[in-house]
Amino acid sequence: MSLAVQVVFTGLSAGAVYGLVAIGHSLIYRLTGIVHFALGDLIGLGAFVTLLVAAGTQPLTQETVSGGRMALAIVVGVVVCVLVGAGGYFAVVQPYIGRSAIGWVAATLALGFAIRAVLDAGFSRPAYVFPDPIPFRRVGHDGLLTILGAEVHVRSFAVIGVAIVVAAAASWVLQRTWFGRSLRAIADDSDGAAIVGISVERTRALAFGLAGGLAALAVVVAAPGTPFETGSGALLGLKGLVAAVLVRFGGLWTAFAAGLALGIFEAAVGTGLLGHLPGLASYRELIPLLAAIVVLAVRPLRLREAVE
Amino acid sequence: MSAPAAAAVRTGAALREVLETARASWTDSATAGGMVALAAALAPFALGGLIATDTLASGAYLALAATGLGLCVGLAGVPSLAQGAFVGTGAFVAAHVLRHTQMPGELCAVIGAVGAAGLGTAAGFAVRSLDAVRVAVGTWLLSWLVALALGALPWLSGGAQGLVVPTRRLFGFSPTPLVHYELAVILTGLCALALVALRRGPFGLDLAAAAQHRGAAAALGVPMERLRVGAFAASAFVGGLAGGFAVQLDIVADPTAYGPLLSFELLVAVLVGGAAAALGPSAGVVVLGLIALVARAFGGLAGVSGSRFQPMLEALLLLAVLTTGGNAFVPAAIAAARRRFPERRIRPRPSAAPLRTRRELLRAHELAERFGHVRAVDGVSLELTPGSITALVGPNGSGKTTVLRLLAGALPPDHGHITLASHELTAATPAERVRHGVVRTLQTHAYFAELTVLEHALVGIDRTRRHGGAVRALVSTPLFRAESRLAEAQAFAALEAVGLAADAARPASELTGTGRQRLMIAAALATNPAVLLLDEPSAGAAAEDLERLTAILDRLRAEGLAVLLVEHNLRLVRAVADEVLELELGRVVRRERLPRL
């Protein structure tokens, strides 16, 4: 029982981040029909810009950053992420939409690897510890709470909470605002949207920026728990993509739920909750990846999908 | 004459023929390619000491893997992001075989390549019918899957320190970096030659057609899924071969070396050098090598390792090439050379063979198709007899095109059946129907933008070839060459029937809209059909186009074809049709036979 509780909380706090990335992937796919291979690295960029503003590239301890500076750092990190995301849309996606698949595939990959190379050049240590925006260590037993016999990080609650708030805000924006209606109109029919006076390119660019920015926010909240590497963003981008593919780029909450499920699955297999098959834990990342490839390959057959 | 003497004479004749074909097909590009290969082989001696030979050898293996990827990206137009995974599979399979057996090095590399080809076949099968977005995502996930598996499974990868590989002799030579380098250059050259041979043969032509317009290729019965699986398998085999040899050069199989970054770098090499040219990927690898040198110098200035800058420079270079219109180095150089030195060789035009057609009766009985609650086609029966033209008319939405699609196999009917002569075709796929002799054209002006007029007809002919497989094309068997000559003559016959024979060598993109429509009729004719299903051939036609179309249709009737004409233009219908069926709400409301002179 205590193991199950442990798995659920660990899984949910990892999965909440995957879920936000999955929302980003899903939104971009429905909006433009492409998959943004640089999304994960954009999130990594947001996280490292936050670190840079908060503490520079030096090693740091959690005591060295004031709350005000940390708040500023998070704002700057998210803003940079949104700007680079939106700029990236104009630079590497828009020229190729509907024209050359190899073009946008290669260009988004290039953007991702370029971002990672810049991070590698600026942050040369193997891994970084993030300053804590909220001093969780003062809560409970050095940041741990005992729930039903399981030791749960207080941070988990914050990560899950922030992710749910962000997802709910995104959902509200999509459903209730002019911007959201424009997005849905473009996703339905971009030519039609253009005819009724929606600025398709600007709206898409903003969505590209927000898709990365929102996830970066969750990453910054989640990051202090574990060491963060320059390649961590790309891995998060991959997990989000896997979650989004598993639900066939479904709706906002579907993608979020897929991310949560992926997090719980990884935690469950990783801790041996699903029985102690020898070596099963090493497959916790491989099984969902394989499942995603299978889901991609076996589309529901739609009348031989006439290609006319 | 004794049997051995006769055999000797035959062999001599065959050899002479090979020599003559070789001389006839020798081009300036072949000379240029040969010179590049020679320069590459001599590079370690010329660069003596400037660049370490083992670095050159690694680069040459990279060029081999990139050339393999060129098959997928260049020929098939598929954005494969898994080539790094295939190289890694080849490397680790070869490493395990080397550690556990005493087999010679080259055999272990080939076994690694076979393992990679297995993975490539599975990957190709998984993405065989997917659009480009899903192919990119699927291969990207595969690339990560292999990288994460190597990281997570020590029994597979030997853990963090990798697998140490014993060194063996290669083809009897001791495995020095120089031997590795020359071997890699030879393999890359052979692979580039194979690409050229494949591109000229049916395999490459069909792949190109499928890449340029899926719908039009499907209408001509191109077996796109099988071709794509083949392209993936072949490209993975070459990648695996590069990995299997390179691991013997490195002496250790490093589990971190085959991640998504390698897949990306190989894609950069192909796109920067040029996916369309056989030597493009190799040129791209040379450019990447130069970038590595620049990155090292750059890193030296900044006081950090140069490898940190390398992906960034590669990414910037790729973006630069993409934004300048995507015409990569080698194709741009070829185009420039062509402008300065026009190709001297003029291909003799083959004498046209007679147009081949079959005479067979198509019967459709009580066809029905529903879309949700709408009965698009509701009990339509018709017969298409050889040497007659049946026109299907009716208002928009009356089910004309749906009937045509049911006959062509693009839709499975909810009810009813279709037979051609004695063959039951109701459940046959479009490709199977084309082989049996039922072929259609599309309503749109769809065509293959980068093929010539003659090549369009050859795509049709490919459906009728029996000795046109990829392996025969690679070794250019006598049967293959004889059949290719015949195919060209038949393609001319099909072009002649629509009045395009004089334009055979022109790019199809230079034709007008109605010209392209006639071209697609010619491609359909080239499949040796019994039944031709034409979807609004008059769309966009001016008065003189209509006259020409009338003449073409009269000619097809005279050849004994059974033609179904879905048409809005009643003038054309009245001018050519033998029988008119009027559809309304999916039912035949009127049948009329028109008297023919």
Image: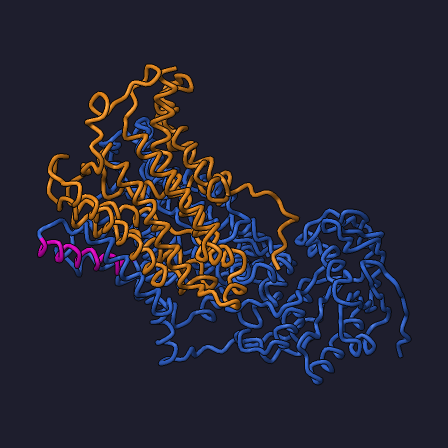
Chain colours: A orange, B blue
Q: Is residue B292 magenta?
A: yes
Instruction: Using the image as rendered, state which of residue A138 and residue B8 is in the foreground.
Output: A138
Q: Residue at x 42, y 44 (%)?
A: A23
Figure check: B438 above or below A172:
below
Q: Is residue A135 left or right of residue A256?
A: left
Figure check: B76 above or below A214:
below
Q: Could you say where residue A6 lies in the image, as x and y percent from the top left?
A: 34, 21
Q: Is residue B25 left or right of residue B585?
A: left
Instruction: Using the image as rendered, state which of residue A100 and residue A238 is in the foreground.
Output: A238
Instruction: Using the image as rendered, state which of residue B321 and residue B247 is in the foreground.
Output: B321
Q: Could you say where residue B349 lies in the image, as x and y percent from the top left?
A: 58, 76
Q: Could you say where residue B24 lies in the image, as x and y percent from the top left?
A: 47, 71
Quadrant location, the N terminus of chain B: bottom right
Give the magenta part as a residue range.
B285-302
What secondary structure predominates along the stretch shown in magenta?
Answer: helix
Figure check: A268 above or below A105:
above
Figure check: B49 above or below B245:
below
